[in-house]
């Protein structure tokens, strides 16, 4: 049994396999425009209201005049609170214990794993001529952050997840006909991840010495080992866009972003939580832990998904514009995650089955020009989750989400404008069902324990953006 336990014990559930900052579709960050957030990102590939069109549809640069710079900050405030529906147990059917060495029970809470994060972005567009425009976007299209206590109920599944991407996106647009514009972009993307979990070393002690199985040694925080993975990579992709203007008031846009595969390299570090306590149980166990859990190289891969959007924009009156969007994300490409180690754990790769599903996002919105200076925005959206209950973990606890967004823009001068927006995301309660069994894919969780319960989720987003034309 211990050999089967080894990989998930030291496994960090690697990268993004299980985490979410804003509980986006998986861990994608659509928060790339404050004017767009006010409309719940309806019409993203067709609106082309400012330089953020570089991200949503580079063909939209042909609707802008001169040069424009747009910069924004999005404050993402997620909350995720876990409550166990049954007493958590380990592979020996013994209890998972708390910081006082007492068995945890049904109703035990995991605290709030949500971590407030900031997603910045920057865009620049230069309309070179009636036929051509160029642009540059710097943004974070994927990201996540969750953090739990080292003694919480699901600590063997996850403690901290902190993933950041930086995407550099030069783009070009060309007016092919009077009505049709096309655009394309190149993406150089950097990813950095810090992922951690606890290792139930007390479980190994009980497997090696069955007499310990009835003692408070298995699944005891005093016998745990803290594991942390740090890895990063640069990789590349592309994006394409089309914009068709039926009339000056009505247009449709289509945008596609390619998948990007990252080959992560880094290291894994380990820390024995209470070596004195472990030595008192058996000095040989401490020596084994010190010899096994040493810093070593680690490598793996992650494929960030492709996506496609179809958007509609209509200027119904001089004051009122309506818009809609449907976006597909190819999360089905994220079917498994394997992490390999270079050292004492080289023969024990960490394997996590994902089996995510493709998702759809639907949104509608409206903009109302109240006067020459002030524009008002509103929108709603429905965002599917790619994760089933069977494969949900604390790193990405989100579920289906309904967005309600409000925003406004103010034109200080002909050149300078500011946008602000707020969105509340009503996130369905999400179920986590992880079982420490010796059957099928579930044996990945053999050493992580049986943890069954529900997350209560919510997200708030507040954003501000400045645009300058010259």
Image (spheres, helix red, strand yellow):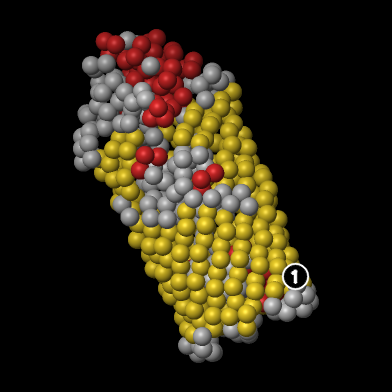
Q: Residue at x 25, y 23 (%)?
A: 94
Residue 342 picture location, percent across and down: 59, 23
Q: Residue at x 46, y 67 (%)?
A: 363
Within 10 angstroms of label 1, few (less than 14), some, or many (20 or more) residues?
many
Residue 359 shown left or right of residue 154 in the figure: right
Nearest the viewer among 130 and 101 is: 130
Nearest the viewer among 421 and 399 is: 399
**Secondary-structure class at tag 1:** strand
Residue 210 picture location, percent across and down: 29, 11
Quadrant of the drawing holding the C terminus: bottom right
Residue 103 seen by the camera? yes
Residue marked by disc 1: 174
As displayed, is residue 394 above or below residue 40?
Answer: above
Residue 143 seen by the camera? no
Residue 374 picture location, percent across and down: 50, 84
- In this rendering, the count of numbered labels is 1
Q: Residue at x 32, y 10 (%)?
A: 209
């Amino acid at each position: 049994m211990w050999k089967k336990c080894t990989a998930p014990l030291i496994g960090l559930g690697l990268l993004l396999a299980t985490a979410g900052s804003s509980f986006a579709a998986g861990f994608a960050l659509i928060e790339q425009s404050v004017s767009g957030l006010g409309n719940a990102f309806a019409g993203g590939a067709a609106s082309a209201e400012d330089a953020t069109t570089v991200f949503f549809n580079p063909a939209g640069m042909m609707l802008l005049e001169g040069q424009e710079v747009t910069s924004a900050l999005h404050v993402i405030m997620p909350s995720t609170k876990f409550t166990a529906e049954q007493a958590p147990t380990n592979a020996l059917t013994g209890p998972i214990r708390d910081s006082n060495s007492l068995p945890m029970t049904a109703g035990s809470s995991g605290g709030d794993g949500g971590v407030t994060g900031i997603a910045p972005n920057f865009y620049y567009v230069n309309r070179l001529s009636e036929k051509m425009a160029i642009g540059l976007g710097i943004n974070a299209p994927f990201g996540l952050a969750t953090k739990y206590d080292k003694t919480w109920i699901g600590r063997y599944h996850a403690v901290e997840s902190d993933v950041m991407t930086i995407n550099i996106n030069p783009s070009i647009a060309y007016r092919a006909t009077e009505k049709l514009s096309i655009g394309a972009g190149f993406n150089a993307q950097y990813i950095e991840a810090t992922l951690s979990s606890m290792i139930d070393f007390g479980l190994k002690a009980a497997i090696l010495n069955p007499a310990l199985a009835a003692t408070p040694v298995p699944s005891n925080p005093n016998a745990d080992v803290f594991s942390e993975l740090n890895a990063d990579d640069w990789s590349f992709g592309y994006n394409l866009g089309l914009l068709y203007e039926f009339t000056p008031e009505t247009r449709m846009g289509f945008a596609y972003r390619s998948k990007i595969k990252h080959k992560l390299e880094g290291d894994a570090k380990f820390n024995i939580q209470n070596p004195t306590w472990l030595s008192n149980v058996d000095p040989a166990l401490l020596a084994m832990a010190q010899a096994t859990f040493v810093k070593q190289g680690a490598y793996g891969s992650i494929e960030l998904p492709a996506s496609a959007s179809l958007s509609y924009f209509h200027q119904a009156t001089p004051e009122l514009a309506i818009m809609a969007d449907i976006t597909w994300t190819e999360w089905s490409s994220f079917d498994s995650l394997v992490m390999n180690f270079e050292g004492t754990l080289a023969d024990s790769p960490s394997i996590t089955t994902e089996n995510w599903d493709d998702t759809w996002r639907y949104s509608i919105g409206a903009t109302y020009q109240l006067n020459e200076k002030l524009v008002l925005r509103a929108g709603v959206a429905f965002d599917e989750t790619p994760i089933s209950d069977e494969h949900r973990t604390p790193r990405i606890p989100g579920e289906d989400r309904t967005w309600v967004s409000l925003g406004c823009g103010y034109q200080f001068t002909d050149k300078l404008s500011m946008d602000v927006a707020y969105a509340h995301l009503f996130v369905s309660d999400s179920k986590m069902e992880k079982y420490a069994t010796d059957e099928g894919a579930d044996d990945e969780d053999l050493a992580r324990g049986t943890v069954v319960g529900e997350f209560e989720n919510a997200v708030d987003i507040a954003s501000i953006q400045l645009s300058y034309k010259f």
